[in-house]
Image (cartoon, grey):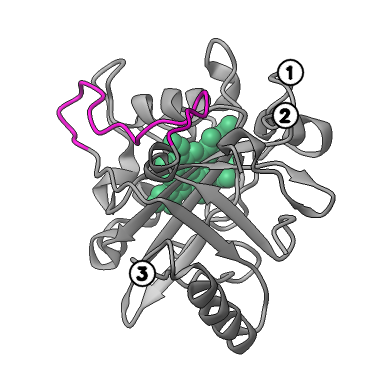
Amino acid sequence: MSNGDQAVVGIGQPAAVALKKNIVGLRMFPTNFGAGLVLPSTSFALWCWLRGDDHGVLLHASRRLVDAASSAFQLDSVIEGFKYDTGRDLTGYVDGTENPKGKKAVAAAIVRGQGAGLDGSSFVAVQQWAHDFKRFESLSAKEQDNSVGRRKSDNKELSDAPASAHVKRTAQESFSPEAFVLRRSMPWADGTRGGLNFVAFGHSFDAYEAQLKRMVGAEDGISDALYQYTRPVTGSYFWCPPMRNGKLDLRALGL
Ligand code: HEM
């Protein structure tokens, strides 16, 4: 059930600490990148991402999961993600275009060469962003496109995008070393509030942190134009164990 198609499970640092185990590379979500913008860091022991198209089926699967885990874990929050149109953020921009594919995606997201129990695992950053739709809609179409660095109408990358444009801040090939991650973000909504539940898998958190650092302007004082209309409200790191014989391989946790 946790093979990634139906579910993804992530272990947070609090769970590793409770088990007195150190997963090399797992840490708490950093708050301070030295740029005057403090990011929320919300640490959780366990993250379970249940996947599917049917809300009813997902609700019952969640209930069963919460019940099954109740002797050790307390439910903190449930975020319902969904697909908007062909895979757009709620601002209307296509999200995921520059994701690595095939072997490159595996190389970006999956741990290798660390030994049994760690190889095949992944580190995931999860950040819930809340959009200010009124603020976003007050921007002209050109300002909106400039904030992302792509044209909403046809998803074309803008050659003249300002340095603050999101895709300029995060251009994966522009980092040294290159900072590739596998993003699997989804929109979320609660009544009329909404935003993006940002999810990025990496073989470590380093690429993600390098991107975040640029987004807050820690390198050159220029912060990501997305901040005009969206802010993170959570920030958590998890380690997704590898699979072995169809089950989670929890050897690294001594289980
Ligand atoms: C509300 C928050 C965010 C929104 C709405 C958003 C939206 C987008 C959109 C529309 C694109 C362009 C299409 C694509 O290549 O996917 C993009 C690209 C990208 N975003 Fe975000 N993003 C958000 C937060 C983040 C965060 C927090 C990170 C990492 C720290 C990030 C990393 C990236 C990367 C690596 C790319 C591809 C850059 C490239 O190599 O061209 N994004 N994002």
- In the rendered image, residue 26 lying in the magenta stretch gets the answer yes
Q: Which quarter of the figure is the C terminus placed in? A: top right
Q: Is mark 2 within 8 Å of ligand 1?
A: no
Q: Considering only order in the chain, which callout, 3 or 2, is on the residue closer to the N terminus?
A: 2
Per the rendering, the mark at residue 80 is none
Height in image: 116 above or below 54?
above
Q: Which residue is mark 1?
A: 113
Instruction: Give the extent of the magenta segment.
Output: 20-38
Task: Tell me if residue 254 can be seen.
Answer: yes
Q: Is residue 148 visible?
A: no
- Of mark 3 and mark 1, the one earlier in the sequence is 1
CA distance separating discs 2 and 1 = 6 Å
Q: Residue at x 41, y 70 (%)?
A: 78
Which amino acid lies under the numbered mark 2 shown in the image of this protein? Asp
Write the residue at 24% across / 39% down. 39
User: Can you tell which mark lies on residue 194?
Assistant: 3
Residue type pointed to by label 1: Gly
> On the picture, is 230 further left or further right than 145?
left
Query: Are the two marked residues, 2 and 1, in contact with CB atoms closer than 8 angstroms?
Result: yes
- For residue 208, above or below residue 96: above
**Magenta residues: mostly which secondary structure?**
loop
Residue 111 at x, y = what percent? 68, 28
Q: Which residue is mark 2?
A: 119
Q: CA distance from mark 3 to mark 1?
A: 40 Å
Residue 171 place in picture, x, y as percent? 53, 27
Q: Nearer the viewer, residue 17 or 223?
A: 17
Residue, far bottom:
56
At mark 2, the secondary structure is loop
